[in-house]
Image (cartoon, grey):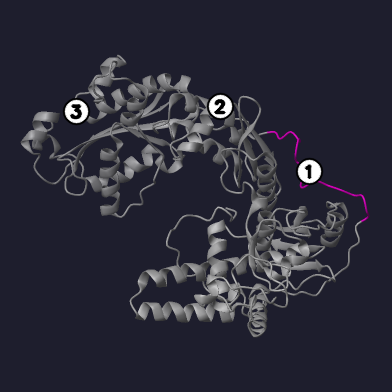
């Protein structure tokens, strides 16, 4: 990645432009965004009779199918199949199909190709069956045995639909015969394939009528209609009808107009609709959806713009159902105190000028304390919190840490004060980005503890090492962006280039360069119209550390090209011996880091 500026830009003062220009602009949904009404969906209802219940071990003896659309029968398919083996007596008793009946019938290798072609499953037709696992399993096994590709159509199981649409009072069981009697189907099932398929088609229509008041009106609704979702929540799926496709941010709004939850998606429509299906497993989020009265969306031109908007909205509204990214400005940092004999301290507010000698922000105070304890121990820094004079007084008395050899004692000994000065310099080097000495000492200690079979102590040392490397990495990524006035960069996408302007770690503007547009004219216009960001005095003033971290990840992604970097900027590179030079040790817990953007 070249660091040499290719051009110089000087945006006129006072010109401001919020991220993107789609906020508040009406978006007309395309017809495909509305979904496919069930009255326009073509269903292929199938039923099989077999020599037993195990696909692959038993054979198909009869295939019956009906193709329907909008309640109208488009065609029927029925044939016996010679299984190549005698029909078991119990199957004959159940179905009435005898070995003599199938002797002159075609074999499955003759029937299957014509059935697959007639079914329309390769052309978007939806397969329907009662207890679909049984029928689909036999059809897939036959395809695999004969070398045919299974078309993998959408599958609707009327058994699963009945369990969602009906109560036990209406239907004591969900057998096909019971459902056929409930819906008064013209054809009653009799364990013959075509009759059972005809009855299943009528049962399907009856179930769809029951599910329509619950919001199941389109094919996309039917795909999740059998999910164990409370009916009241499913009825709220209408809130997603106006949501367009494409990247953007969505907000769930509560009864008092408050923002309950903010999220981002590369496909807004698909993501918002998923909240009303069983794919959403989180109990808190289900509770949030039950409270929500409205979904608001902001369409964005790019994914990076959507993610930045999400972070800013969370920071602005502090939604109660967002756990990640809340209170981003209160993350803990580690820095040296400003006194005669400095020590390490955990702070939550940081001047911009101090960013050259800090680690963080850490995911939690516990992580910050692990790193602080480790560095204090391996460098020899004092850990007491008293403010000490440069020269020890005659009445100075040491604390217990000196007796425990946990502190050099600069409070009582001038020679110890000089020793402590050397420890301070080692800590400065580590906080400034070179953590090699600290990491080497901890790795040696961890290896020694393991050799002594002190595995718990070795694990605690490993956690300290992980906290140090993680804290150093975070500051390395943030430092160049937060201390640079302006960065203009571009990244290739599919049939376009994505351009961003970053000022003091804040996304000030973004645009998409598509084929046919003049590149440098587009870049210059974006820079001139991007948001004016004053130089901050404290970290988090221009942008949250999460936003800066997100932009740092973007700039580190493959294919990024720098178009312009301010002359007074810090190098956009990681220092040799910094946090990114080391691999993170495995954590005890696989819990996600709430600080990191998704």
Magenta segment: does it hold 563?
no
Of the numbered discs 3 and 1, the one sitting upstream in the chain is 1
Q: Is there any visible trace of residue 557 in the rendered image? A: no
Q: Nearer the viewer, mark 3 or mark 1?
A: 1
Q: In terms of image quadrants, where is residue 255?
A: top right
The picture places residue 208, in percent across and down from the top left corner, at 41, 23
Provide the residue designation for mark 3.
Answer: 191
Q: Is residue 524 above or below residue 253?
A: below
Q: Is residue 404 above or below residue 262?
A: below
* Mark 3 residue crowding within 10 angstroms, few (<14) / some (14–19) / many (20+): some
444 on left or right of 346: left
* Mark 2 residue crowding within 10 angstroms, few (<14) / some (14–19) / many (20+): some
Disc assigned to residue 238 = 2
Magenta stretch: dominant secondary structure: loop
Magenta segment: does it hold 19?
yes
Provide the residue designation for mark 1.
Answer: 21
Q: Secondary structure at mark 2?
A: helix
Region rendered in magenta: 12-28
> Disc 3 versus disc 2: distance between alpha carbons?
40 Å
Disc assigned to residue 578 = none
């Amino acid at each position: 990645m070249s660091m040499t500026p290719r051009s110089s830009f000087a945006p006129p003062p006072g010109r401001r432009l919020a991220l993107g220009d789609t906020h508040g602009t009406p978006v007309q949904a395309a017809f495909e965004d509305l979904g496919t009404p069930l009255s326009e969906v073509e269903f292929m209802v199938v039923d099989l009779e077999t020599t037993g219940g195990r696909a692959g071990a038993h054979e198909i003896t009869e295939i019956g199918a009906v193709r329907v659309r909008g309640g109208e029968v488009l065609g029927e398919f029925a044939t016996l199949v010679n299984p190549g083996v005698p029909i078991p007596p119990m199957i004959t008793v159940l179905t009435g199909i005898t070995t003599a009946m199938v002797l002159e019938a075609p074999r499955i290798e003759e029937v299957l190709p014509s059935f697959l072609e007639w079914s329309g499953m390769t052309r978007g037709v939806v397969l329907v069956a009662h207890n679909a696992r049984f029928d689909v399993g036999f059809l897939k096994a036959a395809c695999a045995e004969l070398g045919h590709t299974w078309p993998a159509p959408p599958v609707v199981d009327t058994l699963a639909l009945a369990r969602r649409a009906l109560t036990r009072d209406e239907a004591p069981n969900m057998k096909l015969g019971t459902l056929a009697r409930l819906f008064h189907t013209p054809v009653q099932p009799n364990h013959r394939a075509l009759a059972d398929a005809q009855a299943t088609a009528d049962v399907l229509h009856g179930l769809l009528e029951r599910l329509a008041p619950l919001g199941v009106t389109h094919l996309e609704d039917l795909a999740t209609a059998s999910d164990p979702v409370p009916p009241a929540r499913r009825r709220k799926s209408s809130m997603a009808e106006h949501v367009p496709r494409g990247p953007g941010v969505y907000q769930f709004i509560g009864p008092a107009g408050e923002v309950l939850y903010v999220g981002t998606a590369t496909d807004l429509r698909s993501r918002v609709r998923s909240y009303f299906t069983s794919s959403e497993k989180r109990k808190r989020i289900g509770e949030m959806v039950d409270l929500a009265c409205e979904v608001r969306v902001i369409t964005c031109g790019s994914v990076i713009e959507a993610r930045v908007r999400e972070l800013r909205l969370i920071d602005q509204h502090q939604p109660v159902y967002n756990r990640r990214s809340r209170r981003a400005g209160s993350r803990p940092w580690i820095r040296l105190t400003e006194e005669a004999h400095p020590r390490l301290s955990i702070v939550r507010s940081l001047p911009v000028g101090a960013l050259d000698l800090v680690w963080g922000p850490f995911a939690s105070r516990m992580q910050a304390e692990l790193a602080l304890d480790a560095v204090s121990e391996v460098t020899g820094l004092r850990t007491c919190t008293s403010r000490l004079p440069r020269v020890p007084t005659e009445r100075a008395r040491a604390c217990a840490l000196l007796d425990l050899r946990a502190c050099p004692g600069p409070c009582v000994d001038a020679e110890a004060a000089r020793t402590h000065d050397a420890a301070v310099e080692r800590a400065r080097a580590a906080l400034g980005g070179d953590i090699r000495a600290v990491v080497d000492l901890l790795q040696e200690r961890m290896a020694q503890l393991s050799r002594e079979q002190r595995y718990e102590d070795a694990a605690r040392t490993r956690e300290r090492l992980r906290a140090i490397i993680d804290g150093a990495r975070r500051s390395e990524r943030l430092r160049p962006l937060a201390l640079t006035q302006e960065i203009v960069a571009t990244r290739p996408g599919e049939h376009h280039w994505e351009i961003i302007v970053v000022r003091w770690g804040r996304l000030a503007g973004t645009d998409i360069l598509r084929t046919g547009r003049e590149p440098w004219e587009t870049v210059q216009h974006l820079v001139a119209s991007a948001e004016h960001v004053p130089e901050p005095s404290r970290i988090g003033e221009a942008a949250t550390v999460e936003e800066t971290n997100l932009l740092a990840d973007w700039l580190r992604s493959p294919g990024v090209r720098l178009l312009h970097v301010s002359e007074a900027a810090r190098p956009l590179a990681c220092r040799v011996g910094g946090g990114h030079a080391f691999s993170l040790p495995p954590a005890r817990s696989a819990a996600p880091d709430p600080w990191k953007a998704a």
